[in-house]
Amino acid sequence: MFFVPPAGETLGWTTDYRWKGLWEALRTEGRDEGSLTVRPDTTEFTASFLFPRGIENPQLTIDSPVGLDPDVALSEKDGRKLLTWRVPPGTETIEYIYSIQVNLSNRPIDHAAIDNTVHPASSRPLD
């Protein structure tokens, strides 16, 4: 991204995105897993998982490097469960392995009701 005239101060950016098929295994099997690699120039990363009504007690398990405790919070938004995972800034490249699980026995999943938005938060150069 280029600015004319050049930006005279530190800028941050935020992005949201969706892609087809994201979390398909979670919808059909009740479990999905993956990895996240955080580079040293990432100053903040937040992933939010918003579940359809009727999903109770979703679980997010994170295998993080020794000494880095995952910051995971469970809350509610508009009567729906919301899991939020915040990854702190780092000074080296770090790989996290995660697993997310829900109990599908209570109700069928309404695929259209699941919010696939990943919020990779703000990124700006380290000072």
Image (cartoon, rainbow, N blue to C red):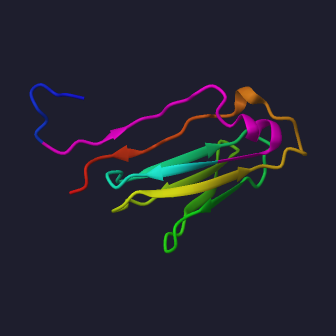
**First to last magenta residue range:** 9-33
In this picture, residue 64 sits left or right of residue 5: right
In this picture, residue 53 sits left or right of residue 83: right
Tell me what residue is drawn at x 85 percent, y 44 percent: 104
Position in image of residue 46 (x %, y %):
48, 50
Position in image of residue 121 (x %, y %):
42, 45
Position in image of residue 76 (x %, y %):
65, 50
Determine which quarter of the picture holds residue 60. bottom right
Tell me what residue is drawn at x 68 percent, y 53 percent: 99
Residue 22 lies in magenta, yes or no?
A: yes
Q: Is residue 71 above or below residue 115?
A: below
Q: Nearer the viewer, residue 53 or 111?
A: 111
Give the quarter of the figure containing the C terminus. bottom left
Q: Nearer the viewer, residue 36 or 11?
A: 36
Give the quarter of the figure containing the N terminus. top left
In this picture, residue 25 sits left or right of residue 103: left
Determine which quarter of the picture holds residue 25. top right
